[in-house]
Amino acid sequence: MRLSVIGCGYVGLVTGACLAEAGHEVVCTDIDRDRIAKLQAGGVPIYEEHLEEILASARKAGRISYTAVAGEAIRAGEAIFICVGTPPKESGEADLSAIDHVARQIAAEAKTPKLVIEKSTVPARTGLELSRALSAYSRNSNIKFRVASNPEFLREGTAVGDFFHPDRIVVGVEDPSSAAELREIYRPILEKSFRCPVHDGACPAGQKAEFLVTTISSAELIKHACNSFLALKISYANVIADLCEKIGANVEEVTRAMGLDPRIGGQFLNAGLGYGGFCFPKDVQAFIYLAAKVGVDFDILKAAERVNKQRIERFFEKIHQALWVVKGKRIAVLGLAFKANTDDIRFAPALEVVKGLLQEGAIVHTTDPEAMSRTKALFPELHYHEDPYDALRDADAALICTEWDSFRKLDWQRAGGLMARKLVIDGRNLYSPQEMRNLGFEYYSFGRE
Ligand code: UDX
């Protein structure tokens, strides 16, 4: 099929690249001309595993192209995926101005009927407004627009794999023809009839994705309900960790036993610095805002958000307890990205930690496998090191802020020999307290003695 993708950020690029790799013809556009120029020149503006290779392969096959002229992209596709940003406003409400802008562009530029698909995370009822805007701004009443919601469940870092191997594909539609069209778009993925770059074509025979057809409002709600539930789960584990510290229990023992109950499940129960990124914080806020707007009490979600914010304070309590005075101390911050395997630092807990350390007058040395160049623009005053051992040299303390695998594998015997003081405050529970103590470290983590 011929498809258009509007917005070439994480969601748009992954969607466009994967749909092209699955056999469709995709035209992508973005208001950021530099981004389009880079993509046209064969560059990839974001780091995401496998993205570069599938973009190159789709480009070679002539199945993906880029244009800075929105009208060209809009006219090219039978179906249009809207993948623009919906950042939070001060109040927590999602800012839908980019969606509105795109809706008006589609209405003005389309010359044939289109299926317009919201892929960006939007609050419930956006589909109705989108529909209204499309007909209100259309210059030709003969052109019919159908609206659908097709939320993404992509995790940064594994987005390509998640796209090709989803647990479920949710399509919220207003008529059966839209559902049929979306099923056709996703047929290669549902039937696994594409060359999977993640498994080099030989995917393990796994469960097939469920194709769920719902109303548009349900589909919109599903995305927020999922992300908010996961955020709730993380905050729950974090409160359990606080309890463990007071009572003298071990959070890992507790959450492991909890996770073995299939009704609970073992994922997203890791205690530590809490969640960040561009999805969870904003989706939780937007869901709280939506609930309040329609008069529904969603206090449990407010509590989850409060618990998450308090993680930074709890981390600083540990820092003060361990280090006493922060001013003038040389501190190694290991990890800047909001989680492992991404260069994304948006709403990263690590940056809150860095901010606090600078305010208290620490000298901050840092390292991150992918996120340093982005952080440099925000915090030029930090000392950046490619090699973690250089960041740790002469440090009074090491703070672990991101769960990178490369940090799990650090040689702490060697690091201890380089540091001014053998002190590790671990915001991601990466190491065994006993092993660190055996190596002569003062070691602090969350919910473990
Ligand atoms: C999330 C959802 O998982 C995805 O389905 C949705 O489409 C977008 O939002 P992402 O933002 O990429 O994906 O991050 P995710 O892997 O879910 O992690 C979110 C945050 O939670 C990270 O900061 C991570 O460090 C933290 N986290 C995760 C914990 O603190 N504890 C855990 O147990 C799991």
Image (cartoon, rainbow, N blue to C red):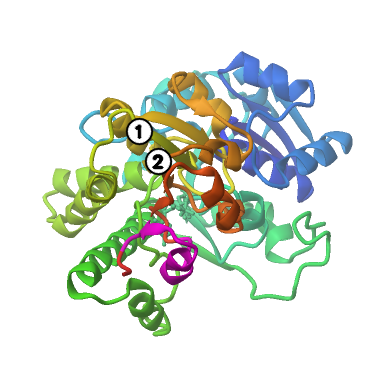
Q: Is residue 81 visible?
A: no
* Picture layout, residue 251 above or below residue 295: below
Q: Give the residue type at disc 1.
A: Lys
Expressed as whole percent of the image width and height from the top left, the position of residue 296 reads 14, 54
Tell me if 242 is positioned left or right of 407 in this view. Answer: left
Tell me if 111 is positioned left or right of 375 in this view. Answer: right
**Which residue, given by chain and number where applicable, does mark 2 sit on?**
396
- What residue is shown at x 49% (from left), y 53% (from top)? 175
Q: Is residue 378 visible?
A: yes
Tell me, yes or no, whether the highlighted magenta stretch contains residue 438: yes
Other-residue count near label 2 (Cα within 10 Å), few / some / many at <14 / 14–19 / ≥20: many
Q: Give the residue type at disc 2.
A: Asp
Q: Residue furthest right?
A: 60
Expressed as whole percent of the image width and height from the top left, the position of residue 295 reads 11, 50
* Picture layout, residue 203 above or below residue 170: below
Q: CA distance from mark 2 to mark 1?
A: 6 Å
- Disc marking residue 122: none
- Disc marking residue 329: 1
- What residue is shown at x 65% (from left), y 62% (from top)? 165
Report the magenta residues as a range.
430-446
